[in-house]
Amino acid sequence: MKIPSSVSSLERISNFILKTPLIKSERLSSPSQNVYLKLENMQKTGSFKARGALNKIYNLNLVDEIVAASSGNHGAAVSYALKTKNITGKIYVPQSAKKSKIDKIESYGSEVIVFGDDCLDAEYEAMRYSRENNCVFVSPYNDVDVISGQGTLGVEIYNQLPDIDGVFITVGGGGLISGIGHYLKSVNSNIQVIGCSPKNSSVMINSLDKSDIVNTVSKDTLSDGSAGGVENGSITHDLCKRYIDKTCLVNEQEIALQISKTLKDEKIIVEGAAAVAIASLIKMRKDITDLKNIVIIVCGGNICKKTLKSIL
């Protein structure tokens, strides 16, 4: 399988996204280690997902209806991408989707359809609808154009910090880490790619040593943006096996602590999925002493007020 060039993808979507800041974190850095935050919480729609959705939409003819499925962030990204072309689509979300994320999807004009208990339920229903109605289904991760779009983050990071040694990335379906890993490993194979997930929902990481995805039951997690099942046979499975060097699982208390500390100490609002990567760096300190320049992907900032208030 060939992943399209993320450099070309960045040229295609650059007019519709922000080049997000890469800032050094004094809190997370040490005398021997520089830790940087790539602030995709400042991206259009509030997460990195805008990159993959835009790249996919701008590679389509768009003669058919567009359908997507999401726990929230990918749905908002597809809805935003469609709005840039003055069209709308149908976005399937699970019953567990946060109201704030549903509101964001609808704010860009697309229709929201609630279906199933898990994001994988919504995904399979959206795929069924697309097959029966001759629509284009935009996967949140199982698509080479989406993966290449997420890989534009890797292009930006390498341009901002050429001597990067390692990157911490939260893993859900694997599209983000596949895209970034594909690009960064192509320019420097020594860059360490660390995959991070909540213990309560870590399907891809649990499946890395398996022949296919093993969809174990996911529990509730603050990392709703990465939670839930993964499509069987997803191309991201092999890509994750190829590019992930180390993995880390964190619990809900560790995630909550980093949501709180990142806001209080650095004045940055992050959602649970972003806090997973930050918590993983702290948990793995003793295992990464050989890495001098580290980047954490702050993948999104779409946390609902009720959740944030309860944590604080």
Image (cartoon, rainbow, N blue to C red):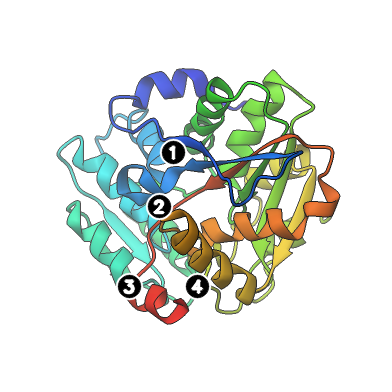
Q: Earlier in the sequence, mark 2 or mark 1?
A: 1
Q: Is residue 208 visible?
A: no
Quarter of the image for residue 179 reads top right
Q: Is residue 90 left or right of residue 250?
A: left
Vertical relation: 133 (above or below) 297: below
| Residue 272: x %, y % from top left | 51, 64
Vertical relation: 238 (above or below) 270: above
Which mark identifies residue 74? 2
Q: Nearer the viewer, residue 284 or 54?
A: 284
Residue type highlighted by circle 2: His
Residue type highlighted by circle 4: Asp
| Residue with the mark numbered 3 | 305
| Residue with the mark numbered 1 | 52
| Residue 103: x %, y % from top left | 24, 65
Quick one: SS at disc 4?
loop
Front position among marks 1 and 4 = 1
Query: Is disc 3 in contact with disc 1, using a CB cutoff of under 8 Å?
Result: no
- Residue drawn at point x = 40 percent, y = 52 percent: 74
| Residue with the mark numbered 4 | 118
Front position among marks 4 and 3 = 3
Per the model, the C-alpha gap separating discs 2 and 3 is 20 Å
Q: Earlier in the sequence, mark 4 or mark 3?
A: 4
Query: Is disc 2 in contact with disc 1, using a CB cutoff of under 8 Å?
Result: yes
Front position among marks 2 and 3 = 3
| Residue 118: x %, y % from top left | 50, 72
Residue type highlighted by circle 1: Gly
Vertical relation: 109 (above or below) 52: below
Quick one: SS at disc 2?
helix
Mark 3, residues whose alpha carbon is within 10 Å: few (<14), some, or many (≥20)?
few
